[in-house]
Amino acid sequence: MIYRVEVNMERAREYLTQANVKTHNQPVVTIWVTGEDPDSICVKAQDKICNDIIRENKSGKTQEIIRDISDGMRVVTIRAGKKSR
């Protein structure tokens, strides 16, 4: 199934600003992911956001603080979407 995941980025925004990252710099970010159980869905959403950030800004500063950015994320809601084909 596909799920809409809302991730609170408030605690991570400080680190995003330090690394001059513009992607996912809103207070709440919505990501669409596929998965079967809530735990894997949360992990996939966080991984997707981190990969987007690294893809945008591949500087050493971003590489150093990506763990802090990941730790600052908090999944707020998971809502089921349409079944994936």
Image (tube, helix red, strand yellow):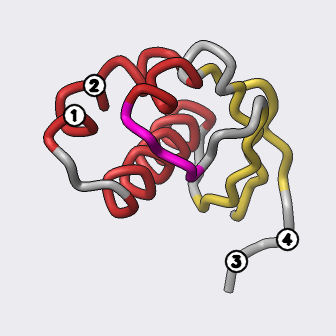
Image spot of residue 46 (x, y percent): 49, 39
Q: Earlier in the sequence, mark 2 or mark 3?
A: 2
Q: Earlier in the sequence, mark 2 or mark 4?
A: 2
CA neighbours of label 3 inside 10 A, class few (<14), some (14 to 19), many (20+)? few
Q: Earlier in the sequence, mark 1 or mark 3?
A: 1
Residue occupying the point 78% across, 72% down? 83
> What residue is shown with label 4?
82
User: Which disc is residue 84 wearing?
Assistant: 3
Residue 22 magenta-highlighted = yes
Contact (Cβ within 8 Å) of mark 4 with mark 3: yes
Magenta part of the chain: 19-23
Residue occupying the point 32% across, 52% down? 54
Identity of the residue furthest to the left in this view: 60
Q: Quadrant of the C terminus?
A: bottom right
Contact (Cβ within 8 Å) of mark 1 with mark 4: no
Residue occupying the point 84% across, 52% down? 80
Label 4: which secondary element: loop
- Secondary structure mostly seen in magenta is loop
The residues tagged by marks 2 and 3 sit, at their Cα atoms, a distance apart of 34 Å
Residue occupying the point 65% across, 26% down? 9
The residues tagged by marks 1 and 3 sit, at their Cα atoms, a distance apart of 37 Å
Mark closer to the observer (1, 4): 1
Contact (Cβ within 8 Å) of mark 1 with mark 2: yes
The residues tagged by marks 2 and 4 sit, at their Cα atoms, a distance apart of 35 Å
CA neighbours of label 1 inside 10 A, class few (<14), some (14 to 19), many (20+)? few
Q: Amino acid at mark 4?
A: Lys
Residue 77 magenta-highlighted = no
User: Which disc is residue 65 wearing?
Assistant: 2
The residues tagged by marks 1 and 2 sit, at their Cα atoms, a distance apart of 6 Å
